[in-house]
Amino acid sequence: MGLGRSDQAVDTPRNLCVSNWVRFLRWNGGASCDSNKRTSVIFWHHQLPVYSPMTLASIMLASRHALRVRPDPRPELVACLRQEYDARDVVLCSGGTEALRFALSEASQDFGRPPVVALPAYSCFDLATAAVGVGAKVWMYDMDPETLAPDLDSLERALKGGARIVVVSPLFGVPVNWAAVEACVDPFGAVVIEDAAQGHGATWRGRLLGSLGSVSVLSFGRGKGWSGCRGGALLVRGQVLPGVSSHLPGREPGLIGEGGIGVRALAQWGLGRSQIYWIPASIPWLGLGDTRYREPAPPRPATRMAASLLNYTRELAIGEASVRRARAECLLEHLRLGPQVKAVRADSEGEGGYLRLPLRLAKGLAGFRDPRQAIRLGVAAGYPASLADLPQLRARIVNSNERLPGGRELVRQLVTLPTHSRCGQVERDLLVRLIDAYEG
């Protein structure tokens, strides 16, 4: 099965040849292919699981702001975020995790300390980092594996158990039914923090993810679609957090900090292509693609370099989001779904940003004939553990005996496919064949 191409076009290695693609690994293409044919995958080729647009020109221009040759770009970014995300207040932070920690700290002032925070059983480990950073007690709520949305019965138990701050994270740019979440939370007077770190380009009822909650958090890291290499933002609306300060405590980033973002940006620009990405991906200590718990760090102001990169790449990121959405929809049309391969069902009133395309596979990444080949095509495993199983968080969990079956099912089954503009037609055809041949 191909995406607008014949099988012959996919099976011919000549179509895959690029000057620096030098070696082929061969494999059986699976049930959708002629059993006498074989499909080729390039050994030195390693597709990026996720991509955020970055140009050399934007880096050069941003460096002038970092060196104080041009005006501070942060007020421009604040004004943009306030308008695009309909926010009353915007606080720029050094990272998305730091922004979430700041949000938890500010929200907890209304409910006393230590706060009881409801966290999803399946999400980025940075949520645990933020909760540990504010000394919170944690009530874990379960997830619906079919939608990646909160299990509302489980969330209601968390609220009845005393949680008054709820973090909801739409994963991989898949929107959840926000009205259902609010209907569950509002009777308890709790604050919902919308962690839209992975929501770039996604909407619900025509509103951007990141504009739905009374408190929202954005992240601008390397793999977030719209990237300043680092950085995050806290967005506040309505009457909540009336005393929030738009300026974080701590020293302004110096030239060394600004230069560090510049080096990251050059690496992201230079290595962010499949013909080269295999080099950093093969270095274990870099941990690319790994999910690791990071110790909490105090929130600090965002750098000028990161803010300027965001200003210069904003239009590129909007265009990239449109590409991701179209490619995700095309993949879903051509994938052979069934008991072994299931798609995640987005809410009918939402439009996905598809930072990556999530699928539920019966045995996860291990069900492929050659998992290494899947990884080289940009397939990535989901989070390797439930937040409930993190040693750093375990002592803080109030409901440690709850089973949380939905979250643990996602740990076993969820994988993601690349949707970005640098994943070409041939690779998308190969991804379809790879999924068709999934053994489970």
Image (cartoon, rainbow, N blue to C red):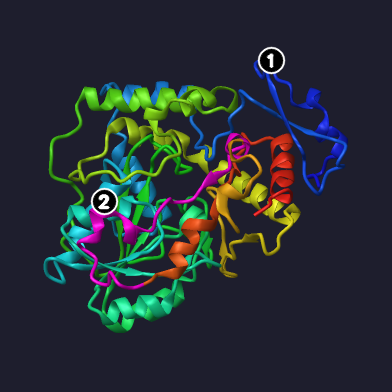
For mark 2, does the 10 Å Cα neighbourhood hold few (<14), some (14 to 19), or many (20 or more) residues?
many
Task: Please indicate, yes or no, whether residue 339 appears anywhere in the rendered image.
Answer: yes
- In magenta segment, residue 437: no
What label sits on residue 19 in the rendered view? Answer: 1
Of mark 2 and mark 1, the one earlier in the sequence is 1
Residue at left offset 36%, top offset 75%: 155
Q: Which amino acid type is shown beneath numbered disc 2?
A: Thr
Image location of residue 180, percent across then percent down: 45, 77
Q: Which amino acid type is shown beneath numbered disc 1?
A: Ser
The residue identified by callout 2 is 129
78 versus 107 height, above or below: above
Identify the image quadrant of residue 13: top right
What label sits on residue 251 in the rendered view? Answer: none
Q: Judge left or right: residue 135 versus residue 139.
A: left
73 versus 348 height, above or below: above
- In magenta segment, residue 380: yes
